[in-house]
Image (cartoon, rainbow, N blue to C red):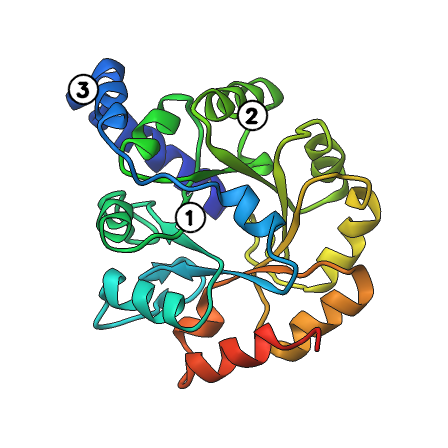
Amino acid sequence: MPNILDQIIQDKKDVLNSVKKNNSLDFLEKKIKNLNFFYDFKKAIQNNKEISLITEIKKASPSAGILVKNFNHLDIAKMFIDYGATCLSVLTEEKHFLGKLNYITDIKNKFKIPVLAKDFFIDPYQVALSKSCGCDCILLIISALNGNQANEIYDEAIKHDLSVIVEVHNQKEAEMALNYSEALIGINNRNLKTLEISINNTISMFEILKSHKGPLISESGIKNEKDAKYILEKTGIKNFLIGESLLKSGNPEELMKRLLQINQ
């Protein structure tokens, strides 16, 4: 039986085969040259001496189903920006998360903030595709790729002046991530194959990753300021990618306020 990650990757291959037929690389590169709303995602995190929140815009997920019934990506983006987000993460995977690349274009046309294209990158073609829609950063999920694929996509992203978050979940992936010196490294507290969550995964992986010169990010499963403060006190990591907790919160403004104050 394929796990959920295998299913998502197979579906992504099918989608890409269709997209490639209608969007040549030359077309995408010309489109990129006509855009002028790119921002340095990595620098926004590095230059922020306080808590950095990368807040996530997503309509649904395989683990939680529909998260936001009356979903409006621009309204959610404005809310997060108004409440102090450093960067945005926008789900662009179509089938399992009900995302769209055009959400990024809409957001970048309206707001000046760095945006991560949160997707399953399995082909270097996706780098130009995502940048042509306005993204500033891509995600490399080590568990979804072999070494050669990861290197090719990483090199393509650097060539396109994009930031890269290399996402890891276990020791082997963390050791591999240290090879990507210019990347941000995201520690996923969710096992993408089983969807189980433990915030202690950030603490475990930190021991391997603490020599990395770039920013470290704790991702997934952070429900409240207590979880974030626990991670901060154990590791010094002050960058958090948070989605479902905010989207499902009855008072996202108050939760973001408390999260931003954990180091005070």
- Disc nearer the start of the sequence (3/1): 3
Q: CA distance from mark 2 to mark 3?
A: 24 Å
x, y (%) of residue 120? 43, 38
> Which numbered mark, 3 or 1, is in the foreground of this view?
1
Residue 238: image location, x then y, percent: 67, 61
Report the front residue among 111 and 106: 111
Badge 3: how crowded within 10 Å, few (<14), some, or many (20+)?
A: few
Among the two numbered marks 2 and 3 on one chain, the one whose residue lies closer to the N terminus: 3
Visible residue check, residue 263: yes
> In the rendered view, does 148 fall on the left or right side of 161?
right
Which label is found at residue 114? 1
Residue at position x 64%, y 64% in the image: 50
Instruction: Choose top left, top right, bottom left or bottom right for residue 263.
Output: bottom right
The residue under label 2 is which amino acid type? Answer: Ala
Q: Is residue 115 or residue 8 the one in the foreground? A: 115
**Badge 2 density bin: few <14, some 14–19, many ≥20, Cα 10 Å:** many
User: Residue at position x 22%, y 19% from top?
Assistant: 30
Let me know if residue 2 appears in the view.
Answer: no
Label 2 or label 1, whichever lies nearer to me, is 1
Decide: is 41 above or below 48: above
- Residue 63 placement (x, y as % from top left): 45, 62
Vertical relation: 10 (above or below) 23: below
Which numbered circle lies on residue 150? 2
| Quadrant in which the C terminus is drawn | bottom right
Residue type pointed to by label 3? Lys
* Dot 2 and dot 1 residues touching (CB under 8 Å): no
